[in-house]
Image (spheres, grey):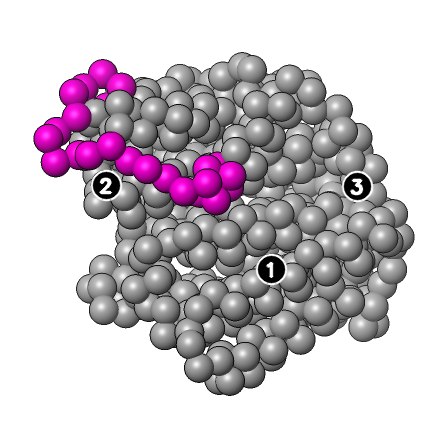
Amino acid sequence: IIPEIILAVALCVIIIADILLKKKNHTTGWILFGALVASGIVIIQRLGVSESVFSGMLIVDPFSDFFRITLIITGLFIILFSIKSAELNAYINRIGEYYMLIAGMFAGMFFMVSASNLLMMYLAFELTSISSYVLVGFTKYSGKSTESSIKYILFGAVSSAIMIYGISLLYGITGTLDLYGIREAMMTESGFSMVTLLAVLMLLTGFGFKIALVPFHFWAPDVYEGAPITVAAVLAVASKIAAIAMLIRFFVVAFPDAAMLQPDMAAVASWNNILAIMAALAMILGNLTALWQDNIKRMLAYSSIAHAGYMMMGIVILGEQGISAVMLYAFLYVFMNLGAFYLAMLYADTFKTDSIEGYKGIGKRAPFESIAFTIFLISLTGIPPTAGFIGKLYLFGATIQAGWIWLVLIAGITTIISLFYYVRIVRNLFLYEPKPEIKEAHFSVSSRTILILLLAPVLLLGLYFAPVLNLVNRSLSIFGM
């Protein structure tokens, strides 16, 4: 667990540096940046190794390594966003606290993707959540930020309570908190199927809250709107991916066969049917509600709910193809979604608007950035030749092959619906004359460099994605399976 230790040390160093630095700046951010790079180097050096630590509470295997690398890439971009953010620079005197909380959040997410014990899963979940509650309310002089933080804490506390009650039920049934022990108990015991189903549904409440799945999504739009946009990006990308990795490990290890839960009702109430319904509702509600949004952060919040639904399709089938499709999509999702959040941040800082209506004519004032925005939105829709098309192609293909035709039909229809609200942004950028108060924008070289670093993978991986697919296939093995 050297990568987690590096992040923990960095968190302590950031606290000390923040106290010692007389002039407040983003030095603490660069400390965290270096820690993430060092963690990434350690992970890459030991790729392919599988080990169990702390009496099996944590599993370090190719599966967790893949997601930790994905989280590190996300974290590096989030730090770069934060350094460029005018919203955070208004709170520069407290910026050390911000990076300390980001470090804690990423340490928690590292543990989330490696946890193989229900208690460890809960602790990792809470470490991530508590940091994110404070981060959402970081811009404390904003009324929306404070309101969002309170809502997030209340909803999060309830979901955590339900989750830990589900853990206690599962422990009472199986006599163990270890996922492999639960698997063995499920294979040897019988007669407690409905209580087990209730326990799993309670655990799904916690997972669903973190992923923002319907019906546990209601916090996301308000929280994304009120939070600093860099924090909203962490919640939409990193937090979601870590929770999905934890959910995959939970079901692959503990409940690989739906019939384990309900020997008498497998066709009606098996967990994969429940997950399929949740995925369908997320795609439908996320995309339909996004149509009516004018605030770009709220629109991206509903969009991320819909994308959680798409990723859930791979978890529904949970075979090798399904898991590889989710892993591929999660990796590609990082670049296209962070790109959209980054440009929303640049436009908010430069043109002082979060409104999609306020984007009218901006394409003529910032042509390169607006073309890049269009590419990110096309990728989120899943149109070739972008990375988003490859991700959806593999997800849809795996789901069709597994026989979930109705789920793919819903995914296809909702993808078409998503085109309407993404195209609305493009229309406003390019098909209107700019208002007189919207002046020509001049973005710095560093801002454009970050944008190119996000844009290049979206375009290149849409044309040549074999290296990522090979990495995914090498990372499929989950320890002990």
The amino acid beneath tag 3 is Ser
Name the secondary structure under disc 1: helix
> What percent of the width, then of the height, locates residue 458?
56, 28
Q: Secondary structure at mark 2?
A: helix
337 to the left or right of 179: left
Q: Is residue 253 part of the magenta span, yes or no?
A: no
Q: Earlier in the sequence, mark 2 or mark 1?
A: 1
Q: Which of label 2 and label 3 is nearer to you?
A: 2
Name the image quarter holding the N terminus: bottom right
Residue of label 2: 351
Where 271 sits versus 457, above or below?
Answer: below
Q: Which residue is mark 3?
A: 475
Mark 3, residues whose alpha carbon is within 10 Å: few (<14), some, or many (≥20)? many
Residue plotted at (51% across, 39% down): 449
Residue drawn where x is 23% and y is 41% of the image? 351
Give the answer, above or below, for where 227 lies relative to 172: above
First to last magenta residue range: 428-451
Question: Does the rendering let one see residue 20?
Answer: yes
| Of the pair 310 and 103, the residue shown nearer to us | 103
Kind of residue sitting beneath label 2: Phe
Query: Which of the pair 201/278 is nearer the observer?
Result: 278
**Alpha carbons under labels 2 and 1: distance apart:** 28 Å
Q: Residues within 10 Å of mark 2 (few under 14, many from 20)?
A: some
Task: Let me know if residue 448 is in the magenta part.
Answer: yes
Label 2 to label 3, Cα distance in Å?
A: 43 Å
Q: Is residue 44 above or below residue 304?
A: below
Q: Residue furthest left?
A: 436
Report which residue position mark 1 lands on.
33
Would residue 279 be seen by someone viewing this image from the given angle? no
Instruction: Identify residue type, mark 1.
Output: Phe
Indicate which disc residue 114 carries: none
- Please tell me whether mark 3 sits on a helix, a strand or a loop: loop
